[in-house]
Amino acid sequence: MKIAVLPGDGIGTEIVAEAVKVLQALDLQFEMETALVGGAAYEAHGHPLPESTLKLAQQADAVLFGAVGDWKYDKLDRPLRPEQAILGLRKHLGLFANFRPAICYPELVGASTLKPEVISGLDILIIRELTGDIYFGQPRGRRTAVDGHFPGADEAFDTMRYSKPEIERIAHVAFQAARKRNKKVTSVDKANVLETFQFWKDVVTEVHAQYPDVELEHMYVDNAAMQLVRAPKQFDVIVTGNMFGDILSDEAAMLTGSIGMLPSASLNARNQGLYEPSHGSAPDIAGKGVANPLATILSAAMMLRFSLNQPQAAERIEAAVKAVLAQGLRTPDIHSEGTTRVGTAEMGAAVVQALR
Ligand code: IPM
Ligand code: MG
């Protein structure tokens, strides 16, 4: 079992270090190899996704990824910005299926900004298509407008597009995931305005014919954004495109108390996967030892389950995370009165302790 460890920038290095300690505490044989990615790779090699890092990721069974990005790179040409590293890995590894579970742990009900009755017991799964949509659609760029409201003016454009096979495969992933859960899929679109998402809706409906045991509902993305904070427990599996999924998954993270709790898995057709917290590099708190490592530790659990075929080890890690929460240990992002404030390394050590 080979794991490529790509900590990246900002808090990425701190949180990945804790997840690595947790993996090492399991009595399993892993080969782990670390490489630079994002701004750190740009500084060292002049590119956010150096050939050697990409090769390591391609040859591994799984990638454990931290986070990339820092405001100081915002002025670089787009192909050199840290974000291109994660987008490049998704593209080159074909990681089209992104799983972002949002679970509200009973101990963290008070850490959310929403009322306890709205979120307690929440367990939803957002499945985001990750290699298509306006994120990757060509053409894109800048040019002089020839029509529109201001002909002759400078303009920028991106292309939203989805092919039928792209929609079909993510729909299958969603229906199959729902079968193992509460058998309900909400497909989120903007079919009332966008041709791309009318097509999305039509194709998802067609694929649904193969899953009569699963309930399918369609919801416009604006309504879905509202329903997520109004009554999030109505959802089981949400499936949506790349951009809507980006936005809705950050929103869903807040239902769980903190984005510092939300793991993710990005899989290709061969179950090779990249595992990363749903949050970013948080340069404002980097190096302070206060970041929450639990999203990354829970991502490592997803890695064991989905790519390394070690479901029991995954369960052990998840149980250890629940145990430290039950002990009252909290990083600042989830801290509330009557609990014990700990830093990144203490939290990681407590999970390791709970594993034993
Ligand atoms: C995410 C992030 C990325 C995205 C960025 C860093 C490119 O926001 O994984 O949700 O937009 O997909
Ligand atoms: Mg995002």
Image: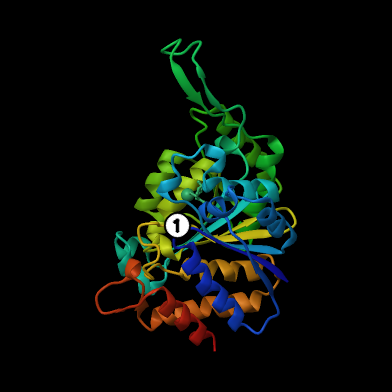
Pick the quarter of the image with the C terminus.
bottom right
Q: Position of residue 149 (x, y in %)?
A: 41, 13
Identify the residue at horizontal 43%, vertical 77% (top origin).
Answer: 345
Q: What number of labels is visible? A: 1
The residue lying at 39 percent from left, 48 percent from top is 227
- Relative height, residue 288 to residue 342 (above, below): above
Seen from the viewer's position, the closer of residues 256 and 329 is 329
Q: Which residue is mark 1?
A: 281
Q: Which residue type carries mark 1? A: Ser
Horizontal side, residue 160 vs residue 74: left or right: right
Q: Vertical placement of 304 versus 159: above or below? A: below
Choose top left, top right, bottom left or bottom right for residue 74: top left
**Residue 212 shows up from this direction:** no
Split into 4 quadrants, where in the image is the N terminus? bottom right
Q: Is residue 99 visible?
A: yes
Q: Position of residue 154 (x, y in %)?
A: 45, 18
Residue 255 on image: x %, y % = 38, 59
Instruction: Give whichever of 231, 328 is nearer the camera.
Output: 328
Relative side of 4 to 159, left or right = right
Estimate how packed mark 1 is, as few (under 14), some (14 to 19) or many (20 or more) residues with alpha carbons within 10 Å.
many
> In the displayed structure, does residue 199 sit left or right of residue 234?
right
Extreme residue toward the left, this view = 337
Q: Residue furthest bottom?
A: 356
State the residue at coordinates (30%, 79%).
Answer: 339
Scheme of image coloration:
rainbow
Q: Secondary structure at mark 1?
A: loop
Relative horizontal placement of residue 124, taking residue 61 as reference (left or right): left
Quarter of the rendering containing residue 330:
bottom left
